[in-house]
Amino acid sequence: SDVCSSDLPKELDADPFKDFKGYKGKVLCIARLSPQKNTKLFIDVARLLPEYAFIWIGNQSLPNFDYPKNVYFIGNIQGAGSYAKYADVFMLPSNYEGLPMVIIEALSNGTPVVASDVGGISELLDCDNGYALKNEAGIMAEKIKEIITLPTQKKEAMFRHCVSTYENQFTVDKMVNGYLNIYEKIVNR
């Protein structure tokens, strides 16, 4: 494999979510609080799945709206991509995107993704590593629960597929070579 360790999010020394006890799973989102990032959808999904902890990293301050007790806004954290390894599902609700690096970081950690089907997200997810879905709470909640409750063998296969998606398509070397191939085709025309 041509994956450099510097391509990957920094490894953490311990599970940063160890204090989130009593939940059947952990759903992580890494995003700023802004109209682009569909925080309302995140909260609506969390309300449908009170047995799971929903953790949001990237808020500069605590939100000024109500949210259920299974939702945690834990602030802006340097190197947050490395936290994905400790979540059962990475969720990215959004109204519009390009090609979100946080999803690539989640895949590099082997974390399945449930995200809004906007921008280039559907190019990253293939149902074996996660889902690009309509911005509907019920649909997203169903897929999150499906992933978390997978039998161990299927969960491990999904983990491996997430990592192989990253290794085969999104390492720095793969992406640079992809751009070089595009430029070469343009120049050769």
Image (cartoon, helix red, strand yellow):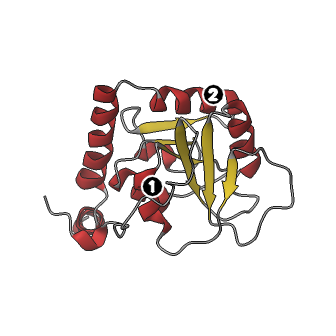
Mark 1 lies on a secondary structure that is helix
Number of residues whose C-alpha sits closer than 10 Å to that of mark 2, classed few (under 14), some (14–19) or many (20 or more): few
Given residues 6 and 177, the one toward you in this image is 6
CA gap, disc 1 to disc 2? 22 Å
What residue is shown with label 1? 84
Q: CB atoms at circles 1 and 2 under 8 Å apart?
A: no
Where does residue 52 sit, x and y in percent of width and height? Answer: 60, 38
Where does residue 89 sit, x and y in percent of width and height? Answer: 49, 43
Q: Is residue 57 left or right of residue 111?
A: right
Where does residue 98 sit, x and y in percent of width and height? Answer: 54, 58
Q: At 65% from the left edge and 68% from the top edge, which residue is drawn?
A: 75
Q: At 49% from the left edge and 54% from the top edge, which residue is drawn?
A: 18
Q: At 41% from the left edge and 59% from the top edge, which residue is drawn?
A: 105
Q: Is residue 135 left or right of residue 26?
A: right
Asked where in the image residue 178 lies, by quadrant, the reply is bottom left
* 24, above or below 19, in the image: above
Q: Amino acid at mark 2?
A: Ile
Of mark 1 and mark 2, the one earlier in the sequence is: 1
Mark 2 lies on a secondary structure that is helix
